[in-house]
Amino acid sequence: MAKKIGLVLGSGSARGLAHIGVLKVLHKENIPVDLVVGSSFGALIGSIYATGMDPEEVAQKFCKLTRRWSITTFFPRFHISGFVGGSMLQRFLHTFLEDIEFDDLKIPFTVVATDIETGEEILINEGSVKQSVRASMSLPVVFIPVHYNGRILVDGGLVNPLPVNIAKEMGADIIIACNVIPKAKQIAKYIGLRKKNWRFPLDCFLRPERIRLPNMKKVLFQFISVMEDKILIANLREAKPTILIEPKVGHFKSAEFHRAKEIIACGEEAMEIAMPALKRVLNNS
């Protein structure tokens, strides 16, 4: 009996575009995928893949995103529940997922979200794919939560940024997981969390070093990075994937969707490096 191959795509905002590179290599190598689990941005890429769309076509669409698109999509439109309403994101999701239901997908797919009232991990595999993905991507404070099936749902990365255990529960024997969450220290370095704050040019000679405190946005994203990193480490102790792909994307910022081509290439490179190990596992199964 052939073993089931499960694909797990984790959270990571724009860094999650590396998932597309992983998919391109799997598609090129004709590696079959029997089920997909996605959290946050991984839910978006996983859902698109589960529709049967060619990864190369997916890459081309994302590579058309501009810096202006990122600014417009994440531009604050203040609401009592979040800074961003998400209407632009909703329209973007519609270009890929339209009104597709889970029953319409070509590959079994599960979305991970978080019930903000109870803190529960919510698994969605029925109903509207677009709405479930929108819920899983609803980063608290940034995006307005989604009311879905009587629950108020937010980002799946809060409880399970790389849901390997869910793929196992779904019956996957071989699990390929792509993690794009960099270490918190790496994120702090690239977003410039610490900056010197000189009032005058001679301050460096007359006064001891002063550090300007980071702004609210940087603190928020660093907080999320620390939280996801800690949860990820704890979860991987409980459930380890067969093959763990970790593209080198830590130097990209969370909203740099206009750098899709570079980020996707990082995913391709990481998957190419891991391919010999994956083939050994498949040949021995």
Image (tube, rainbow, N blue to C red):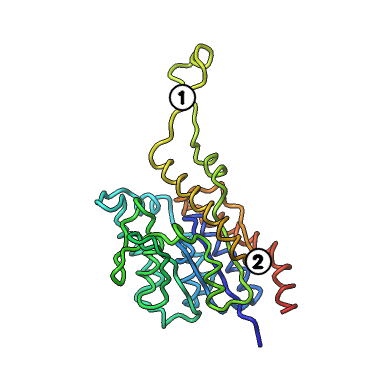
Which one is closest to the eye, mark 2 or mark 1? 2
Question: At which x and y percent is residue 159?
Answer: 46, 60
- Residue 243, numbered label: 2
* Residue holding disc 1: 197
- Residue 218 lies, with reference to residue 132, above or below; the image says above
Q: Could you say which is closer to the camera, residue 11 or residue 166?
A: 166
Q: Is residue 26 left or right of residue 128?
A: right
Q: Could you say which is closer to the camera, residue 29 or residue 153?
A: 153
Location of the N terminus by quadrant is bottom right
- Residue 99, numbered label: none
What residue appears at the point 56 percent right and 50 percent down from the top-left corner?
182
Question: At which x and y percent is residue 49?
Answer: 50, 72
Please identify the residue farthest to the top as the structure is shown: 206
Question: At which x and y percent is residue 121?
Answer: 42, 65
Q: Is residue 279 left or right of residue 96?
A: right
Q: CA distance from mark 2 to mark 1?
A: 44 Å
What residue appears at the point 55 percent right and 63 percent down from the top-left corner?
19
Location of the C terminus by quadrant is bottom right
Mark 1 residue crowding within 10 angstroms, few (<14) / some (14–19) / many (20+): few
- Residue 186 lies, with reference to residue 43, above or below; the image says above
Q: Amino acid at mark 1?
A: Asn
Q: Amino acid at mark 2?
A: Ile
Question: At which x and y percent is residue 174?
Answer: 64, 74
Q: Could you say which is closer to the camera, residue 217 or residue 58?
A: 217
Mark 2 residue crowding within 10 angstroms, few (<14) / some (14–19) / many (20+): some
Element marked by disc 2: strand
What residue appears at the point 30 percent right and 72 percent down from the top-left corner?
149
Please identify the residue farthest to the bottom as the structure is shown: 1
Q: Is residue 117 left or right of residue 250?
A: left
Picture quadrant where residue 275 is located: bottom right
